[in-house]
Amino acid sequence: MAKYLLLKHYRGAPAAVNDVPMEKWTPEEISAHVQYMRDFATRLEGTGEFVDGQALAPGGTFVRYDGEGRPPVTDGPFAETKDLIAGWMVIDVDTYERAVELAGELSAAPGAGGEPIHEWLELRPFLTEPPTVTE
Amino acid sequence: MDEALLRSLTPGVLAILVRRGADFAAAEDAVQDALLQAVRVWPADPPRDAKGWLVTVAWHRFLDATRADTARRRREDLVDEERAPGPAPSVDDTLQLYFLCAHPSLTPASAVALTLRAVGGLTTRQIAQAYLVPEATMAQRISRAKRTVSDVRFDQPGDVATVLRVLYLVFNEGYSGDIDLAAEAIRLTRQLAAAVDHPEAAGLLALMLLHHARRAARTAPDGSLVPLAEQDRGRWDTVTIAEGVRILQAALARDRLGEFQAQAAIAALHADAPTAEETDWVQILEWYDELTRLTDSPVVRLNRAVAVGEADGPRAGLAALAVLDPSLPRHTAVAAYLHERDGDLATAARLYAEAAHKAPNLPERDHLMRQAARLNARRHR
């Protein structure tokens, strides 16, 4: 089994095919989208492939150490940041092909007009523990 | 086996061990072991005296653990003076446990976790699941909390207000996860209100019951939020509402008003309205004024602005909102609502979308996004 992170971006991914901001959808289209996401996670729980799914608030702060005895320095949020993560789903699957297949299904979530968004999702493999058996 | 009944015995059993001289941290572990064993053994072999059984098993667990410990001398002292499975613990003992678990030296998250385990009798795994953190994380949080209060004397009087805040926190997060934390918070508050003569404990219990009564109507079958005004009031639990109102009235009659009683009074006025249109906003506004006087919390002032909008019209509500800090959580959502009521749909739609991006949780975000979408769809028709 291998874990993959499916990243959804507020900004920074290539434009989706059905690229209409959510507030321009109808309430029914929003409901259908939410239901699709929920059904997807439920189905993956059923297949034993779901690990975690979380959504992030858009505003973030950068923080760094500023030396002994000083409070950390903070900066941001930066409205112009190019790349902004909206949320993720972590899946635990047998193969890379399966991960791509599932990401494709998630990207088909319906948007405006009830049509698939064709949203670009970023697929990132987790670094794993070193194997015990090496030869 | 009735697990809630089993868990209701937890604080009494723990208090007996502490009274017998066990230190709190070790006693708490021993009681957890006894509870787990009860879950295994009781279905086939139920004891005649449930509490006596738990005390005996927990005490032996404690002695075994102490024996394995370096504190041999202490253990021998304790064995020497071991008493018969003792007198029923007084109500005061349970109260002392609440005080200890909500001790001001604890962070809110630690106090919540310790209360749920030591008073509520939940396992570390159940608490971890309820708060969506790994079990190891929660185990550490609890053992750190126990270390923090290890020097607190068990018979020191505590502050009921700190306990009430912890129970309120448990209740307010209570609708996620497999463990029903809202119901657990109600059980613990009920137990507290019985143990302490304090109108605010009754006020908090009433507040919880009145909100809990609307639970079934708060969410649509698809999981989305249903705002108060749109809820199917036929699905409100009238028995629970009646109990909440009764408890609240008895508390108010004592004439020692506090913030939980005032909040419960607002909830009771909503519960009392047969339809949203018949809500007595004028009286609700009076309670918000009272609440502002009691707490002066910005969140209360924000909710008050909504009440002003309903009682005196959206313009008055917007004026009340204008003096508040725009960075308050849900400020934008309230502004959107008041602008919609005022007929300015374009501004309302823009603000709903903005509020959705700031929303602190997904159901709220989805709800606000739907509000924006609803207005945009109407404007473009």
Image (tube, coloured by chain):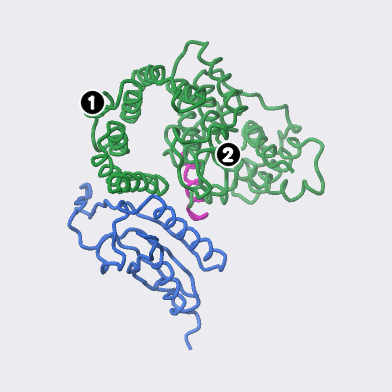
Chain colours: A blue, B green
What is the quadrant of residue B11 in the picture?
top right
- Assess disc 2: are there few (<14), some (14-19) or many (≥20) residues with their C-alpha within 10 Å of its C-alpha: many
Q: Which tag is nearer the camera, tag 2 or tag 1?
A: 1
Quadrant location of the N terminus of chain B in the rendered image:
top right
- Assess disc 1: are there few (<14), some (14-19) or many (≥20) residues with their C-alpha within 10 Å of its C-alpha: few
* Marker disc for residue B39: none
Asked if the stretch drawn in magenta spans residue B141, the answer is yes
Q: Chain of mark 2?
A: B
Residue lying at the far bottom of the rendered structure: A135
Asked if residue B67 can be seen in this view, the reply is yes
What kind of element bears circle 2?
helix
Identify which amino acid the numbered label 1 is placed on: Ala
Near-viewer residue (B193 or B346):
B346
Residue B198: % across, % down: 52, 18
Q: Main secondary structure of the magenta part?
A: helix
Asked if the stretch drawn in magenta spans residue B332, the answer is no
Give the magenta-colored segment's residue range: B133-148
Q: Could you give the CA–CA distance between mark 2 and mark 1, rounded to whole angstroms?
A: 48 Å
Residue A42 shown left or right of residue A67 in the figure: right
Residue marked by disc 1:
B319
Near-viewer residue (B166 or B183):
B183
Residue marked by disc 2:
B118
Residue B265 shown left or right of residue B318 in the figure: right
**Who's the residue at 31% across and 51% down the image?**
A23
**Who's the residue at 44% across and 26% down the image?**
B277
